[in-house]
Image (cartoon, helix red, strand yellow):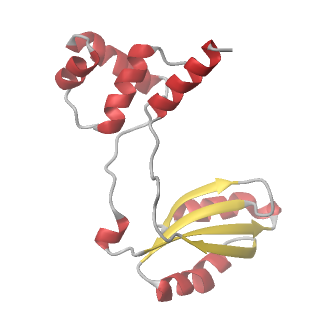
Amino acid sequence: MLDTLDRRIVAALERDARLSFGELAEEVGLSKTPCWKRVKALEEAGIIRGYSTRIDPARIGFGIEAFIQVSIDFEVSDAFEAAVKKHPLIRRCYATTGEADYLLQIVTVDMMALDRMLREELSRLPGVRRTVTSMAMREIKGDISFAEAAGRMVRGAQTK
């Protein structure tokens, strides 16, 4: 569980992972060395898994975002998962409960590319039996603050 200072560090890095250690330390109210040590401890614990840049897919030509429920022959699930990990247009893949075995989030340039991907690529992945596609019309919320969510859980547990 994160303490208050760790949550503040994580929240600041969620907002801007490009902060220098000096800027981060100032924002969370620590000196530079203790701040650096806390960040390193968060990285070593696997809480901070890495740093990345968020790209707007539409601004670089990926105008279609879709969510695809996939049902597979489960005896080939390892091969399916390996193929999904290699596919460059599959942004995320989750194993799910319910009617489908997996939920994929994909991007393509247009409807023709989506159709081609579904027919020529996705349907040929190992074990695929059925797909159901839903189109994203617009994004309402794209990210959450895990630090804020963790703080809310701690506050909720304290009120019980």
On the picture, is 133 further left or further right than 147?
right
State the residue at coordinates (28%, 38%): 16
Residue 83 spot, x, y in % from top left: 60, 65
Which percent across, then down, holds residue 77? 74, 60
The quadrant of the rendering that contains the N terminus is: top right
Q: Quadrant of the C terminus?
A: top right
Above or below residue 51? Residue 4 is: above
As rendered, which of 121 and 15 lies closer to the eye? 15
Above or below residue 149? Residue 105 is below
Instruction: Name the residue at 80% across, 63% down.
Output: 99
**Residue 152 drawn above or below residue 125:** above
Picture quarter containing residue 6? top left
Task: Specify whether 6 is left or right of 159.
Answer: left
Left or right, 116 with respect to 18, comes to right
Identify the residue at image location x=36%, y=36%: 14
Closest to the observer, 140 or 39: 140
Residue 64 to residue 88: above or below: below
Image x and y of residue 47, in percent: 48, 28
Residue plotted at (35% across, 23% down)? 9
Quarter-of-image position of residue 5: top left
Residue 159: give x, y in percent of width and height. Answer: 63, 14
